[in-house]
Image (tube, helix red, strand yellow):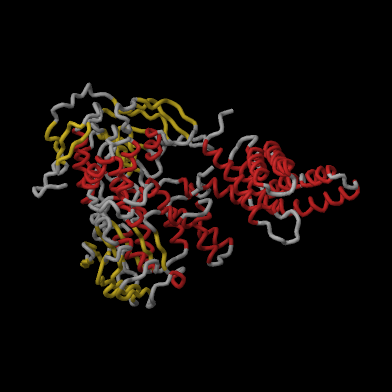
Amino acid sequence: MIPASGIYLQAVTCPITRSSIFTTNYNTGDAVASTACKRREVDSVVRIKNYSYAYPDTTQFAIRNINLDIETGQCHCVSGPTGSGKTTLGLAIKGLLPPGKEEGRISGVSATEDGGTDIGIVLQNPEIQILASTIGAEIAFGLENLCVDPAAMPARVGEALEAVGLDRPFENETAHLSMGQKYRLILASHLVMNPRLLILDEPAGQMDPDGLKKLLKVIQALKNAGMSFLLFEHNPEFLTEIIDVYWHLDSEGYLRAGHFKMSVYDPLRSGSPGSGRLGATDGEVVSVRKLTVSGADGSPIFSDLLLRVAKGQRVTVYGANGTGKTTLLRCLAGFVQASAGDVMVFGKKPVPRNLRGKVGCLFQNPQQQLFENTVYDEVAFPLKRYGKRRSAMASKVDEMLSMCEIGELAEFSPHKLSYGQKHLVALASVLAADPELLLLDDPFAGLDQSRCEMILNLLSRLNQEKGLTIIWACHHPQMFSGWADLEFLMKRGKIFAHSS
Amino acid sequence: MTRISLKESLFLGFCAVFILLSRAALRLHLGISGHVMFSTMFFLLIARGCVPRFFAATITGLFAGTAAMALGMGKGGPLLLIKFVLPAMVVDIGAMALPFMFQSYLLCALVAATAASTKFIDTYVMDRLVSMNPDIILQHAFLEAAPAVLFGVAGGLFVPPVIRRLKSYGVI
């Protein structure tokens, strides 16, 4: 599909006339021919007027008095603190909110002439949007619903996969994809349907820098073709080139005109808890020699990995989506068996039962480790398991909730929180058990800058005070460069190390 | 009142199916009368707790009773319907009178006990129709109803945590 020259041409349907007349170069992001598409006028795709919404069983509005007008071909970016209601706004525009208290109106999206979809939304947690068991079927599902000729589907599916940088066979199983790859898959399954407005919830939270660069080109090309975009993004610095309008949704749920502010956290600045470090102390916590782990198809995800982590060290593992970061952490926790090589954690082969209380794991999708009815019960769960007395448990839970700044959520259901808030709850629950080794799989996804700083400071403090060993997997290398004692890069099934 | 949604209808249908399946699966020869009331009360209360409509449990009972009748489960023929609908109606009335009952173990147990006690009426009516001696009818109805009430209460006590869990996950 991609010619040797690297020029990738694709017909893009004009979202206004719904005719395939644009030929767009996804590599350069330019619309190279736009002969027939006559925009009737620069009209609104979505117009939101004084819109407020409260979830069922609550009286407090999650979002208030929202006024937003998205015109054809525009890209709007909404940022705001974790839990401020960004996803709620996206769901409201898509019409997916449960019946609750509503004021104002959302209008402007009309039925399309060819039965195409008007609005697409890619949620922060792509796993809840995946319906099919294979990549090809997942992307073709939307086309089937649009009654596209089956003969035309393979080409369109292939083009969509290529556009998002997910170069995988159609028959690959969706269950074996990493979170970042799943996000790309859902993105492709929406792009293939040519929506008039595409809403992307935290693309930078799930996609690696290369993926974001590709996304940038795709968005630019589609903007030129008249498609509109609404991004909910804490870190829009990767996407500034294509954003036309910035908004800020504050913690009260009010949407105000925003602006882009580059904010880089320096964990080593004077006075920051991150500036001090315990460094390596006596005792090896993790020892990995010639580790090879194979995927479901038998091909190695990574091979001959070497890793040594001493007690009290901070280790970060970077890598693009699908390079095996999560698999490595799961292997250290004993959830995945090595195909070859040795893994020793605290001097023994990792068996989850034997590591209980010593190793804390924070999964990339926090929903996978939340199961209690309230946030309080969730944080108290490990303490109950270890037979803590009720009074000691209460004080420990309160301490963890306040450390993670989620005290006000204690009586809320963890399953109804935002993605970022779920991460904080899962982190509080993991830390409540006072682990000696902490395995973190992309804990910043869905969190705003201040919450990221809070987590970093908290972990730095625990590292210094309690000698907590931390292994952290992440796909944005520059996020906390300099914070770790050891930094590793996973690439093409290998790990490369250097000390900072 | 708004029309019952597809999701609600499906949920009630599933509850009715589970009542029947558990009846079929629990036909254990334990020599204990009324043990099927455990699952019947559990699913009737769950149906009413998850679908906040006055007639939710009754509809479930009606579905289950009709299917049981059609499948020839039990000995009552058309009267089998009473066995399902009567306790279901009691659950609906209980839920209407006690709107917060699904958060309380005590209230769930109380309503389950009352609903399960309708076993006394079923047995009494059936025995009367076959012209049994009135003294024996009363004794038989009591012997049938007493364990049914106990099993019904046990089924009712499982409802609040399940409702809480479903609410916390946003299913209801």
Indicate left or right for A237 with A388 as reference.
Answer: left
Question: Foreground: B111 or A59?
Answer: B111
Indicate left or right for A189 with A429 as reference.
Answer: left
Residue occupying the point 28% across, 40% down: A150
Regarding residue A103, the answer to whether it shows in the image is: yes
Quarter-of-image position of residue A17: top left
Quarter-of-image position of residue A437: bottom left
Q: Position of residue A79 (x, y in %)?
A: 32, 40
Q: Position of residue A268 (x, y in %)?
A: 26, 58
Residue occupying the point 65% across, 49% down: B42
Examine the rendered structure and indicate whether residue A337 appears above or below residue A29: below
Regarding residue A266, the answer to whether it shows in the image is: no
Indicate left or right for A425 with A256 as reference.
Answer: right
Examine the rendered structure and indicate whether residue B135 appears above or below residue A145: below
Residue occupying the point 88% across, 47% down: B132
Examine the rendered structure and indicate whether residue B96 appears above or below residue A378: above
Residue occupying the point 27% across, 66% down: A300
Question: Foreground: B92 or A210?
Answer: B92
Total marks drawn? 0
Question: Foreground: B171 or B164?
Answer: B171
Indicate left or right for A8 with A302 as reference.
Answer: left
Q: Position of residue A106 (x, y in %)?
A: 38, 27
Placement of the C terminus of chain A among the 4 image quadrants: bottom left
